[in-house]
Amino acid sequence: FTVRQTWHGDLDNGAEVTSGSNPDFQYEAVSAVEKYISPKSGALFLKMAGVPDYSDCKNAALSSSKINLNTFPVGSWMCYKTNEGRYGRFTLDSYGDPDGTTMYLDMRTWSSP
């Protein structure tokens, strides 16, 4: 799904949302070169070294710390736990323009096993 900078994402529904709709993260832009994925509403994240599966994400030491996108290039993987308690993973597929004002995520949120 697509998320524009300063907007929020809901990983339970795979949608860009407003801040008032209990989002899982914000695509935070401090400046043109300083950007973050910032967990919201109790969601947790962790960068992963490879393609994670359900057990990798469930057993990962997930955190509420924001992730600097300068350390998370295109093709990187992230595990998460949504604010609804579901685990998932996403990869940063691409940015929609050279300035990175839009990012495209390929995500999978698992239902409870």
Image (spheres, rainbow, N blue to C red):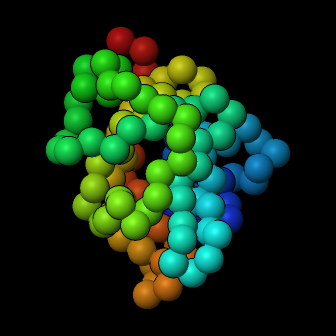
**Would residue 64 be found to the left or right of residue 112 on screen?**
right
Query: Toward which corner of the image does residue 82 lie, by quadrant?
Result: top right
Q: Which of 82 and 63 is in front in this view?
A: 63
**Would residue 43 be found to the left or right of residue 94 on screen?**
right
Residue found farthest to the bottom: 98
The residue at the point 25 percent across, 26 percent down is 56
The residue at the point 60 percent across, 24 percent down is 84
Query: Toward which corner of the image does residue 60 lie, by quadrant?
Result: top left
Residue found farthest to the top: 113
**Would residue 4 be found to the left or right of residue 54 on screen?**
right
Image position, residue 35 (x, y; %): 54, 66
Q: Is 110 placed above or below 34 here? A: above
Residue found farthest to the left: 50
Evaluate whether residue 49 shows in this view: yes
Image position, residue 51 (x, y; %): 19, 42
The residue at the point 48 percent across, 32 percent down is 63
Evaluate whether residue 109 shows in this view: no
Query: Toward which corner of the image does residue 8 lie, by quadrant?
Result: bottom right
The residue at the point 55 percent across, 35 percent down is 64
